[in-house]
């Protein structure tokens, strides 16, 4: 059952060294503030899972938090490479990074299998591609009814799932609207979950047809963190900080420049570090 607590308390209670951690959000509602708190608390040896790792995973990898990345696309959207991720893979700095690459369809299916408490996902895919040659977790089964050969991947069942959402009510239910990725599936598949939210309200009121509500019993911890998704965006609250994504390319290219930025903007700050930028993007 969801408990309301500070972000620092939520991370301390639910994220441990060596955990499999999924931080999801598809362009929208990426949990940057929570990722920064994981960095501040010095977590190490994490297996980071995400369909589209971008800047927050670049930052986690560059601070030595990650031992492995399970993903289906990685990059700085619209800009280029993730330089800290490349440095870890190519040069082992600050520590070696193991990669397990999948397709989007495989990742979404794997989360759904985890949410359903199944050991693996079955789907039509990986036909005529090379990923199975480099990823031993991509296998196949023959349908006992039709004889069709289908692709399989292990279920994703994180130790901890972390997402950002728009609102929570005072009973601990969580509302997501706008672009919805696999946040629901990630939370349902995980042993523990943290949700940061823009606000806590008495009643959700009217909502759009695509709204997702996570019941309180699916969530471990809720932290009030306005601006917690910036520089990604939160539907109805603030726009995407495109300038930051562009600026990150230069920041992350050089190790010393990157470390200086992280010390000033993450390690020395708290969950409200980007709130001033959010006001400009609203």
Image (cartoon, rainbow, N blue to C red):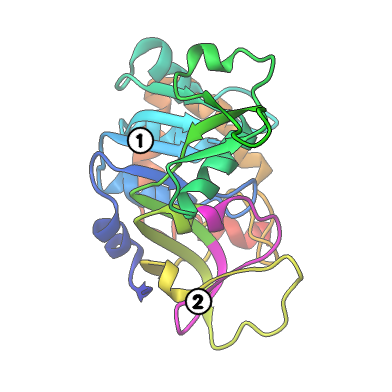
Q: Secondary structure at mark 1?
A: strand
For the view shown, which residue lies furthest in the front direction? Answer: 145
Q: Residue at x 48, y 54 (%)?
A: 115
- Which residue is rendered at x = 41% and y = 73% of the image? 217
Q: Residue at x 37, y 28 (%)?
A: 68
Instruction: For label 2, count other residues whose C-alpha is less than 10 Å away and answer few (under 14), some (14-19) or many (20+).
Output: many
Q: Quadrant of the N terminus?
A: bottom left
Q: Is residue 17 visible?
A: yes
Task: From the viewer's perspective, tell me whether residue 14 is left or right of residue 184.
Answer: left
Asked where in the image residue 47 lies, by quadrant, the reply is top left
- The residue pinned by badge 1 equals 47
Q: Nearer the viewer, residue 46 or 200?
A: 46
**Most distant residue in the right direction:** 209
Residue 171 covered by magenta stretch: yes
Frontmost residue, 255 versus 176: 176
Q: Based on the displayed image, in which of its 4 quarters is residue 14 positioned?
A: bottom left
Magenta stretch, residue numbers: 165-185
Q: Secondary structure at mark 2?
A: loop
- Alpha-carbon neighbours of circle 1 within 10 Å: few (<14), some, or many (≥20)? many
**Residue 142 appears at what percent x and percent y?**
58, 27
State the residue lying farthest toward the bottom.
Answer: 202
In the picture, measured across the screen, residue 13 lies left or right of residue 176, that is: left
Q: Is residue 73 visible?
A: no
- Which of the numbered marks, if any, corresponds to residue 170? none
Judge left or right: residue 175 versus residue 114. Answer: right
Mark 2 to mark 1 CA distance (whole Å): 28 Å
Q: Any magenta on residue 84?
A: no
Q: Is residue 18 above or below residue 184?
A: above
State the image coordinates of residue 3 (x, y, percent, origin top left).
34, 74
The residue that label 2 is drawn on is 173
Q: Residue 111: x and y, percent?
A: 51, 46
């Amino acid at each position: 059952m969801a408990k309301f607590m500070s972000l620092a308390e939520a991370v301390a209670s639910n994220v441990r060294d060596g955990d499999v951690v999924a931080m999801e959000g598809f362009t929208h509602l990426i949990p940057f503030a929570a990722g920064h708190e994981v960095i501040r608390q010095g977590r190490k040896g994490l297996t980071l899972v995400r369909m589209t790792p971008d800047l927050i995973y670049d930052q986690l990898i560059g601070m030595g938090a990650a031992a492995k990345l399970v993903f289906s696309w990685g990059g700085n959207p619209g800009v280029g490479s993730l330089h800290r991720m490349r440095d870890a893979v190519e040069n082992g700095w600050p520590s070696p990074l193991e990669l397990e690459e999948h397709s989007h369809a495989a990742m979404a299916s794997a989360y759904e299998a985890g949410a359903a408490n199944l050991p693996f996902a079955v789907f039509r895919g990986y036909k005529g591609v090379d990923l199975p040659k480099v990823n031993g977790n991509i296998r196949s089964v023959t349908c006992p009814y039709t004889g069709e050969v289908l692709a399989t991947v292990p279920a994703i069942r994180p130790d901890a799932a972390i997402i950002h959402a728009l609102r929570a009510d005072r009973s601990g239910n969580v509302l997501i609207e706008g672009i919805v990725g696999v946040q629901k599936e990630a939370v349902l598949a995980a042993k523990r979950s943290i949700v940061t939210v823009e606000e806590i309200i008495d009643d959700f009121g009217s909502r759009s047809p695509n709204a997702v509500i996570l019941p309180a019993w699916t969530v471990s911890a809720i932290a009030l963190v306005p601006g917690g998704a910036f520089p990604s965006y939160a539907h109805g609250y603030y726009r995407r900080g495109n300038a930051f994504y562009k600026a990150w390319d230069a920041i992350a290219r050089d190790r010393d420049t990157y470390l200086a930025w992280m010390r000033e903007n993450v390690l020395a700050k708290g969950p409200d570090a980007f709130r001033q930028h959010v006001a400009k993007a609203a």
